[in-house]
Image: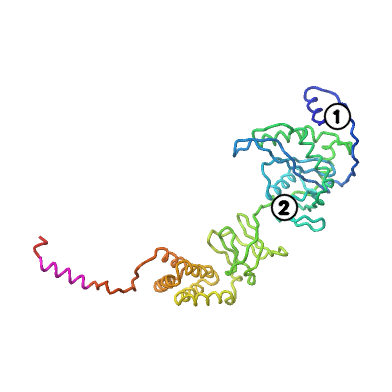
Amino acid sequence: MPWRFWQDLVSGGYDGGYQTVQRFVGKLRGHQQPEGSGIIITAAGEECQVDYGTGPMVRDPQSGKYRRTRLFVMTLGYSRKSVRLLVFRSSTRTWAELHEKAFRRLGGSPRIVVLDNLREGVLKPDLYDPILNPLFKDVLAHYGVTAMPCRIKDPDRKGKVEAGVGHAQKTPLRGLRFESLDEAQAYLDQWELRWADTRIHGTRKRQVAAMFAEEKPSLLPLPIEPFRYYEYGERTVHLDGCIEVEAAYYSLPPGWIGKLVKAQWDGLHVRILHPGTHQLLREHVRQQRGLHRIRIEDNPKKTPLSTVQLLARAARAGLHIGTLCEAIHRHQGELGVRRILGVLSLAKKFGVSATDDACAAALELGIHEYRFVRRYLERQPQLTLRQVDPLIRELIQYRDLINLKTQENPHERD
């Protein structure tokens, strides 16, 4: 708080020192015995600390109302140089993007980042073997950085960034409101340049900007390209040997049917990873919705036992159902497994008898498609070309009847 008062006084023309204001505020508060704390000394370019704090009130463009922002702070351990960024919402990708943006602003990256165990970065806290969020871990690896989560409920390990968060909350942002996030970020950047970088650090007794000029050459160089962000998740390998990603299907090597794998995808590629070792199993170019992307070597050399059992189940359901399912598998291979399952689901929905008749019609027309059977049943046809009924007379009888009537009354046509 004294720092904020001193800044406001200097902006108004006051030429006194900060220590004078600090002593005056201390007298108003009363003397308090400070608590002792250890000092963690790090080498130049070795470490940074990150944390979230409370940002100012900014008008949300979606709702039109003021809402509280989140303040992301990254502080270098050697020079105490900080990067402060404002966001409305936090997510795994936002957390990773803030780190990348901070590295870009610093012009390099440290070797270690010390952070809390918040969910965006750490999936499972553990002092000795924490499980990091995959996207966050890959972003750090892209920049050559290693994450070091703190011990749970031990904020002293990252006291430098805690001080940086508090410094920003108490001085430039306290009680202010902004009409846009860009306006608030511009105000914060100007304060960073004017006050935070030019201050004399209390422990090192040197200017932050001068110490950062010494530290910057020790930072790791930035990669040429920024990180390519992706979505990720877990998928089960289906009977056709494929996983589904956004309504498209991608193959794996034989032997993975029924197992759980990890998948990563972006606008260009889909990568399928081993669930335990994260080894790359397959990488495919993105496919259109509803279509498959299968490598030739991923096709099984023989019919899998699960498919054989599925065909036997179809044969037991009905004669024509089994014949059509055999034809689907013969023409489409393992891709047809989903269609076979679809035919069996139709038998449950519309009944075995109706489905068997629909399959018979498909076989008669030489159409070996699940879609034909589904549409046939949805339209619920009453008659087919093969059906014969005693009430339906031959067409020749209707012709003879018309000729007879016209010959009996030839003048009626005039």
Q: Residue at x 62, y 59 (%)?
A: 270
Q: Which residue ends up furthest to the left in the rendered image?
A: 411
Question: What is the chief secondary structure element of the magenta stretch?
Answer: helix
Q: CA distance from mark 1 to mark 2?
A: 43 Å
Q: Residues within 10 Å of mark 2 (few under 14, many from 20)?
A: many
Q: Residue 135: which quarter of the image? A: bottom right
Checking the image for residue 29, the label placed there is 1
Q: Amino acid at mark 2?
A: Phe
**Residue 269: horizontal and vertical position, in percent?**
62, 58
Quadrant the C terminus occupies: bottom left
Q: Amino acid at mark 1?
A: Arg
Side of 250 where 196 appears, left or right: right
**Which numbered disc, 1 or 2, marks the residue closer to the eye?**
1
Magenta highlight range: 396-409
Checking the image for residue 136, the label placed there is 2
Q: Residue at x 58, y 66 (%)?
A: 294
**Residue 142: horizontal and vertical position, in percent?**
73, 53
Q: Residues within 10 Å of mark 1 (few under 14, many from 20)?
A: few
Q: Is residue 363 above or below residue 235?
A: below
> For residue 348: magenta?
no
Q: Residue at x 63, y 71 (%)?
A: 254
In terms of secondary structure, where does tag 2 sit?
Answer: helix
Q: Residue 380: which quarter of the image? A: bottom left
